[in-house]
């Protein structure tokens, strides 16, 4: 990453983004791109969201946006955030803030006209980087050296940052998984602070915990960061019975592409995972499928037939961690063939000779014979 404090990125020169931020600066208000978009631009990583902060008050931001022909939506007005929609794209614009009071879950804030106040209420130094409309970077808390070293470090006192919001414990490990130097290790002061405040995780809603865990597990290789979280006692605190041994053997292997948080979660284990992480019904069913079938002996073809090719490949990959053998080309071909197979027999083929439970049992037995034949038996074979 270059030392020069200036970014160049497609999103920075995008006419819509420029029009949004310059609507504020042209009105005489300080405004900067901030956070992930600046961080990722410096790292050469993709940018998903463009956030802006400003000295202008929320009501002023809304007025400026409307006068510029944009739509202003007060999505987080209690915390000073207005979502400005320009050309169908959302830009979150937040007024500079400073914390007045915190309880470990949410903060009471006061508006400020100083970028430095805004920077010191953020979590990590690499997330407190600002860039003007011309790409010039401002670094009020020393984030550039940390970003260059891929070091995730709390701003100021880690204990104070965590006491402000316990979710920062999970964010510390998530950001290390995504942006930390895997060879440099995790920041020792941050790790010690997380370990000291593990009990504060009880203050968080399960929805917030589940959201962060999904994002952590979606990292290219979350195993080292999650193992550090386990070392603090945090993992067992939110997921009793969970562990990282199987995950460490799985991530980065040929069985792991592409990153799938639920597949990885199946290896982490734990009790009441769906409820503790507030998984959706579809997520809970897929996790249950992975955990059930990874320890079963169902043939690849039947996996493909019953659950589809993608799920079959995922299950075969999970089994490789337990059995030590990667799925072969033949395994994958069998799963694909099963996914394409269509059972040739219908209930009407056995009626009226069979009815009710007898009909269901006969169909089930015929399907079993067909699967065991490698899906080769025809309708006539099954009827005979």
Image (cartoon, rainbow, N blue to C red):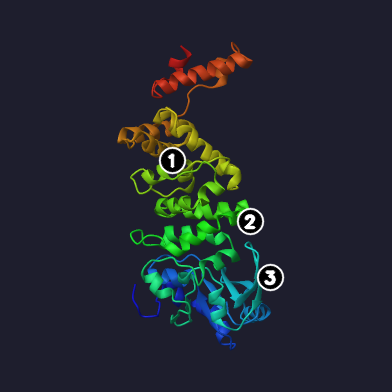
Kindly identify which numbered label has been placed on residue 310.
1
Residue 170 in sight:
no
Is label 1 in a helix, a strand or a loop? helix
Give the vertical position of 212 relative to 363 (above or below): below
Marks 1 and 2, the one that precedes in the sequence: 2
Furthest-left residue in view? 329
Q: Give the number of the disc on residue 12.
A: none
Residue at (51%, 36%) from the top-left corner? 289
Vertical position of residue 93 compared to residue 258: above or below: below
The number of numbered badges drawn on the structure is 3
Residue marked by disc 2: 203
Residue 216 lies, with reference to residue 135, above or below; the image says above
Pick whichever of labels 2 and 3 is earlier in the sequence. 3
Res. 375 image quadrant? top left
Residue at image mark 3:
78
- Which numbered mark, 3 or 1, is in the foreground of this view? 3
């Amino acid at each position: 990453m270059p030392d020069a404090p200036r970014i160049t990125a497609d999103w920075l020169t995008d006419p819509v983004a420029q029009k949004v931020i310059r609507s504020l600066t042209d009105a005489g208000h300080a405004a900067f791109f901030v956070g992930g978009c600046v961080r990722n631009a410096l790292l050469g990583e993709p940018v998903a969201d463009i956030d802006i902060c400003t000295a202008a008050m929320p009501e002023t931001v809304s007025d400026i946006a409307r006068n510029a022909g944009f739509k202003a939506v007060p999505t987080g007005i209690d915390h000073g955030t207005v979502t400005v929609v320009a050309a169908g794209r959302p830009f979150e614009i937040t007024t500079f803030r400073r914390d007045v009071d915190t309880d470990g879950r949410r903060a009471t804030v006061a508006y400020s006209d100083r970028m430095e106040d805004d920077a010191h209420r953020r979590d990590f130094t690499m997330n407190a980087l600002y860039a003007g409309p011309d790409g010039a970077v401002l670094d009020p808390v020393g984030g550039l050296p940390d970003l260059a070293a891929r070091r995730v470090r709390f701003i100021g006192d880690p204990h104070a940052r965590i006491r402000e919001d316990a979710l920062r414990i999970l964010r510390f490990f998530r950001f290390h998984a995504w942006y930390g130097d895997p060879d440099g290790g995790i920041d020792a002061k941050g790790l010690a602070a997380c370990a000291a405040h593990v009990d504060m995780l009880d203050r968080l809603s399960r929805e917030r915990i589940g959201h962060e865990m999904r994002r952590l597990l979606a990292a290219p290789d979350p195993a080292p960061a999650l193992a550090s979280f386990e070392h603090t006692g945090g993992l067992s605190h939110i997921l009793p019975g969970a562990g990282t041994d199987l995950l460490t053997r799985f991530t980065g292997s040929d069985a792991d592409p592409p990153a799938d948080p639920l597949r990885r979660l199946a290896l982490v284990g734990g009790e009441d995972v769906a409820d503790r992480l507030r998984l959706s019904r579809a997520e809970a069913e897929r996790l249950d499928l992975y955990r059930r079938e990874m320890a079963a002996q169902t043939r690849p073809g039947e996996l493909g037939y019953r659950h589809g090719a993608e799920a079959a490949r995922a299950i075969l990959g999970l089994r490789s961690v337990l059995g030590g053998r990667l799925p072969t080309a033949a395994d994958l071909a069998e799963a694909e063939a099963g996914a394409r197979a269509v059972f040739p027999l219908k209930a009407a083929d056995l009626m009226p000779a069979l009815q009710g439970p007898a009909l269901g049992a006969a169909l089930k037995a015929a399907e079993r014979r067909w699967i065991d034949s490698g899906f080769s038996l025809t309708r006539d074979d099954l009827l005979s």
